[in-house]
Amino acid sequence: MKSFFSTFAFLASASTVLGHATFQQLWIDGVDQAENCTRVPPSNSPVTDVTSTDLRCNVGGATGISGLCSVPAGANVTVEMHQQPNDRSCANEAIGGAHYGPIIIYLSKVADATTNQGDGEWFKVDEEGYNVTTKWWGTQTLNANCGHRSFTLPSDLAPGNYLIRAEVIALHAAGSTGGAQFYMSCYQINVSGSGTATPAGVLFPGAYSATDPGILIDIYSTINNYTIPGPADVFTG
Ligand SMILES: *[C@@H]1O[C@H](CO)[C@@H](O)[C@H](O)[C@H]1NC(C)=O
Ligand SMILES: *[C@@H]1O[C@H](CO)[C@@H](O)[C@H](O)[C@H]1NC(C)=O
Ligand SMILES: *[C@@H]1O[C@H](CO)[C@@H](O)[C@H](O)[C@H]1NC(C)=O
Ligand SMILES: *[C@@H]1O[C@H](CO)[C@@H](O)[C@H](O)[C@H]1NC(C)=O
Ligand SMILES: *[C@@H]1O[C@H](CO)[C@@H](O)[C@H](O)[C@H]1NC(C)=O
Ligand SMILES: [Cu+2]
């Protein structure tokens, strides 16, 4: 049984290298910002070590871009994922179809989003895991929407610089420890408004454990419930 599963997991990962993906573009209230404020990761390969600082904003933090997008609190923000750099074609799946898993979006309030290392607290603003009734993963919604995922920036959020951390966790090989694949990018934004909310959050690394029920999981077995990794709270204002 164990060897059968290991073989299956190996085949699943070996056959889906082309399925890798990165969050690349951003939209604000329907206006395309392209990659102007995106810390585009160095490659579309996943992070797999939940104890690494690479879990914050991808390998090395992907710092070095100066773009800062202005976003009013309450705006409709859209992150956009694709498999290959600058390929925004909806004919190609955003992330390879076998890469099932949740999508989670975090924010961190920072002094300067263009230089921050992602070492502050992160709070969730949006997520989609697994629907046990429809047997449907967040990544399937993402693929059905050409890699676009929209959320409302909480309208009472305190103004200032933030990093957005958009993440997909691919679970096709997550039946063994270290098999989950974390795909994340950070976006540099400056929020305007008169809100005062400063939600508490969690640290990366620290928020996830390799043995969390939503990270170490055989998705080829029947799933009766799925626990999305990270804090239970999603701050919506
Ligand atoms: C947010 O913007 C996206 C992209 O422009 C759009 O498809 C979506 O309908 C908008 N959502 C809301 C709630 O306005
Ligand atoms: C990105 O920034 C450049 C330089 O400021 C600007 O010319 C361009 O219009 C921006 N692109 C988008 C899509 O906003
Ligand atoms: C799962 O899908 C069903 C059927 O569409 C829906 O009624 C239910 O609200 C969904 N559950 C969650 C947690 O989104
Ligand atoms: C951020 O936005 C505020 C309010 O709109 C503005 O006063 C400030 O100059 C902006 N900061 C940066 C670094 O662009
Ligand atoms: C399902 O829920 C139970 C009880 O809340 C928990 O112990 C278990 O780890 C969960 N399983 C998954 C796959 O999230
Ligand atoms: Cu992959």
Image (tube, grey):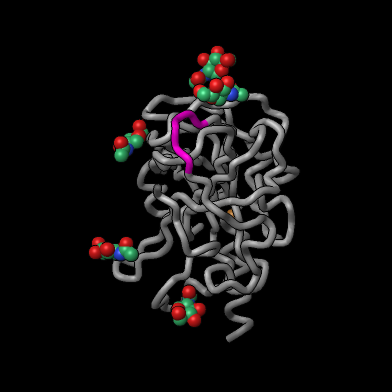
Q: How many marks?
A: 0
Q: Residue at x 62, y 62 (%)?
A: 207
- Answer yes or no: is residue 36 visible: no
Q: Classify residue 5 as left or right of residue 64.
A: left
In the displayed image of the protein, which residue is found farthest to the bottom? 1
Can you give x and y, in whole percent of width and height, for residue 233 in the image? 46, 60
Can you give x and y, in whole percent of width and height, for residue 36 in the image? 57, 25
Magenta stretch: dominant secondary structure:
loop
Above-or-below relation of 87 to 106 = above
Q: Residue at x 73, y 61 (%)?
A: 51
- Residue 195 among those drawn in magenta: yes
- Residue 39 among those drawn in magenta: no
Can you give x and y, in whole percent of width and height, for residue 39 in the image? 63, 35
Q: Which residues are magenta?
A: 191-196
Most foreground residue, 90 or 53: 53
Q: Residue at x 55, y 57 (%)?
A: 169
Q: Classify residue 234 as left or right of residue 178.
A: left
- Answer yes or no: is residue 24 visible: yes
Most foreground residue, 88 or 237: 237
